[in-house]
Amino acid sequence: MEGHYGWGTSEDGWRKGPWTPQEDNLLTEHVKLHGEGRWNCVSRLTGLMRSGKSCRLRWVNYLRPDLKRGKITPHEVTIILELHAKWGNRWSTIARSLPGRTDNEIKNYWRTHFKKGRSTKNIEKARAKFLKQQHEQKQLQQQLLQQQQQQQLRLEVPQFEERAVAQEMQEMAYMCNMPYVFHGEEIVDKMTVSRCDDRSSDDEAYFDMWENQQWSLDDLGLDMGDQMLPFYY
DNA sequence: AAGGAGACCAACCGCGTCTCT
DNA sequence: TAGAGACGCGGTTGGTCTCCT
């Protein structure tokens, strides 16, 4: 592995390029003993010929035990889209809301899927999804509120009527392709349900459902005007 | 089967901010 | 308070993998 891929050492003597398992072990042991931080001391204490910067990056992005491995889930994509709409390219801020994911990972994912130029359409679609979702969420909340108020007005509601109302609302939510379902008596995120039920294929099916939508902002019938969310790419 | 394109990922770089002396 | 070093962040690059033609 030493010096492969044409990587070598920098002018100031630091090794560069892919990390070897031995280097990973040294760094992991060092962090176990001394904790994170003081990255510039690592080379002196472990004999690693890596800069502090490189050590920190390797630990944060790859060796940290709490890292979540595997593909970004549809639920995480939703969060990323929402937070990116809010904060733009502040990857580390976004990463804080996704336990186990690194800023680098999220940044790479974003660039791959929503990079400027190649997938402006994707980004529009994603934004449309998010805006539509927000809009429908508000609508549903309002309707729920109205339903609750109506129920409070009625002292007694026959059970079959309650069921009919719940069914109607569920159908409505489904027709809107909303990411929420009725789970027991609660309205919860579909992802939460599928995670609870351990049905990963549901995630895929659900995500496909979103992906196959051919929305545009115009289709939403929303006059976003000045409220247009900022998108940076 | 081979080659090209795109997806994915690890790692580097530059720069701004923070902290310590 | 100022300067130096440490740290963190975002942008970019380049290698590998996978899929499609």
Image (tube, coloured by chain):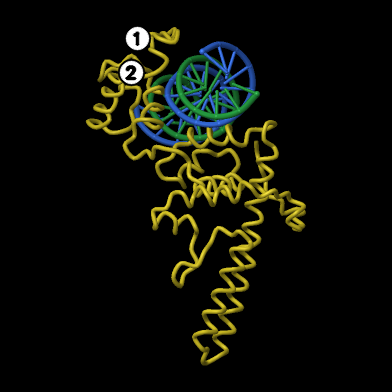
Chain colours: A yellow, B blue, C green
User: Mark 2: which amino acid?
Assistant: Thr
Q: Which mark is residue A107?
A: none
Is residue A37 positioned above or below A10 on the image? below
A11, A171: nearer the viewer = A171
**Cβ atoms under marks 2 and 1 closer than 8 Å:** yes
- Identify the residue at horizontal 63%, vertical 47% (top origin): A212
Residue at mark 1: chain: A
The residue that label 1 is drawn on is A2
The quadrant in which residue A197 appears is bottom left
The quadrant in which residue A88 appears is top right
User: Farthest residue in the left direction?
Assistant: A33
User: Mark 1: which amino acid?
Assistant: Glu
Is residue A86 positioned above or below A14 on the image? below
Q: Position of residue A30 (x, y in %)?
A: 25, 26
- Identify the residue at horizontal 52%, vertical 79% (top origin): A163
Which part of the image, by quadrant, shows the C terminus of chain A?
A: top right
Residue at mark 2: chain: A
First reached walking from the N terminus: tag 2 or tag 1: 1
Which part of the image, by quadrant, shows the N terminus of chain A?
A: top left
User: Callout 1 environment at 10 Å: few (<14), some (14 to 19), or many (20+)?
Assistant: few
Q: Position of residue A10 (x, y in %)?
A: 43, 9
Q: Position of residue A162 (x, y in %)?
A: 53, 82
